[in-house]
Image (cartoon, rainbow, N blue to C red):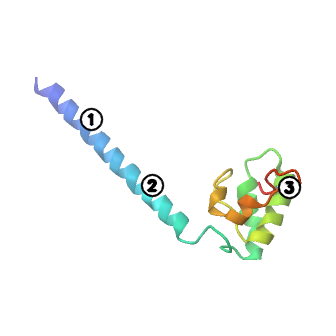
């Protein structure tokens, strides 16, 4: 009789700890994004090749990705975090469009 109650309490405790840890990690991520590491003017021009290598490392179109990423980085001095998406962190990078209206920056 005590065993099922103990198991239930342990599961609830694990769930609560997991939820708290998830919230702490989310706050750390948001603080990291807000800290100025990303965003307009957050890079020096010499940092563009390494940041674009990171950004383009998982695409099958590595050469065009690197070409356009470095072009965008030189103009915006910003490369979004991650391998894809997150462009809202860098509005210049996000809003630069091709003649056809598609995204210029990877």
**Between disc 1 and disc 3, whose residue precedes?**
1
Q: In which quadrant of the rendered image does the N terminus lie?
A: top left
Residue named by callout 2: 26
Disc 1 and disc 2: Cα gap in Å?
23 Å
Mark 2, residues whose alpha carbon is within 10 Å: few (<14), some, or many (≥20)? few
- Residue at 25 percent of width and 37 percent of height: 12
| Image coordinates for residue 54, horizontal then vertical, percent | 71, 58
- Residue at 57 percent of width and 72 percent of height: 36
Secondary structure state at the residue bearing disc 2: helix
Res. 71 mark? none
Q: Is residue 61 above or below residue 6?
A: below
Q: Residue furthest right?
A: 99
| Image coordinates for residue 52, horizontal then vertical, percent | 75, 61
| Image coordinates for residue 72, horizontal then vertical, percent | 79, 64
Residue named by callout 1: 11
Q: Nearer the viewer, residue 45 or 91?
A: 91
Secondary structure state at the residue bearing disc 1: helix
Disc 1 and disc 3: Cα gap in Å?
53 Å
Q: In which quadrant of the rendered image does the C terminus lie?
A: bottom right
**Between disc 1 and disc 2, whose residue precedes?**
1
Question: Residue 81's image quarter?
Answer: bottom right
Q: Nearer the viewer, mark 1 or mark 2?
A: 2
């Amino acid at each position: 009789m005590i065993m099922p109650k103990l198991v239930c309490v342990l599961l609830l405790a694990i769930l609560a700890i997991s939820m708290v840890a998830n919230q702490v990690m989310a706050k750390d991520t948001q603080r990291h994004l807000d800290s100025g590491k990303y965003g307009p003017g957050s890079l020096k021009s010499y940092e563009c090749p390494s940041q674009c290598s990171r950004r383009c490392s998982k695409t099958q179109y590595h050469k065009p990705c690197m070409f356009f990423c470095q072009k965008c980085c030189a103009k915006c001095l910003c490369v979004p975090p991650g391998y894809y998406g997150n462009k809202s962190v860098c509005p210049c990078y996000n809003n630069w469009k091709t003649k056809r209206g598609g995204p210029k920056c990877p």
